[in-house]
Amino acid sequence: MSSSIKLFYWDVVIPSMKKGQLPTKICPVCNRPFEWRKKWRNCWQEVVYCSEKCRRNRNRHAELVSASKL
Ligand SMILES: [Zn+2]
């Protein structure tokens, strides 16, 4: 059945987009916007951090946030 072929929005729409039109998110660790990347095409909705480095730094970030609340 053709319906078994799963097409993601990112597979269809994103490749036709030019730089600057790609979806962006703000990284909560470095507070910088980052653009959609091909490796995230199947998990963009779950992507939170711009890089592995920021992902590893998230605990430090959480400490800073909780410290600033005290
Ligand atoms: Zn970052």
Image (cartoon, rainbow, N blue to C red):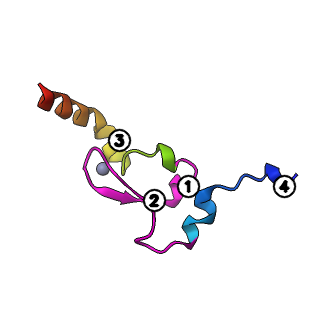
Image location (x, y in percent) of residue 53: 32, 46
Classify 10 Å Cα crowding around label 4: few (below 14), some (14-19), many (20 and above).
few
Residue pointed to by mark 1? 41
Horizontal side of residue 42 vs 35, given as left or right: right
The region drawn magenta spans 16-43
Indicate which disc, 2 or 4, sits on the residue closer to the N terminus.
4
Q: Distance from label 4 to label 3 (Cα)?
A: 38 Å
Horizontal side of residue 31 vs 69, given as left or right: right
Q: Distance from label 2 to label 4 (Cα)?
A: 28 Å
Residue at the image point whose x is 32% and y is 49% from the top: 27
The amino acid type, in three-letter code, at marker 4 is Ser
Q: Do callouts 4 and 3 mark residues in contact (Cβ within 8 Å)?
A: no
In the figure, 35 relative to 61: above or below?
below
The amino acid type, in three-letter code, at marker 3 is Arg
Q: Is mark 2 within 8 Å of ligand 1?
A: no
The amino acid type, in three-letter code, at marker 2 is Trp
> Overall secondary structure of the magenta stretch?
loop
The label nearer to you, 2 versus 4, is 4
Q: Distance from label 2 to label 3 (Cα)?
A: 16 Å
Compare residues 58 and 31 and report the one nearer the observer.
Answer: 31
Q: Quadrant of residue 7?
A: bottom right
Indicate which disc, 2 or 3, sits on the residue closer to the N terminus.
2
In the figure, 28 relative to 65: above or below?
below
Residue pointed to by mark 2? 36
Residue 2 marker: 4
Kind of element beneath mark 3: helix
Kind of element beneath mark 4: helix
Q: Do callouts 1 and 2 mark residues in contact (Cβ within 8 Å)?
A: yes
Image location (x, y in percent) of residue 40: 51, 53
Residue pointed to by mark 3? 55
Indicate which disc, 1 or 3, sits on the residue closer to the N terminus.
1
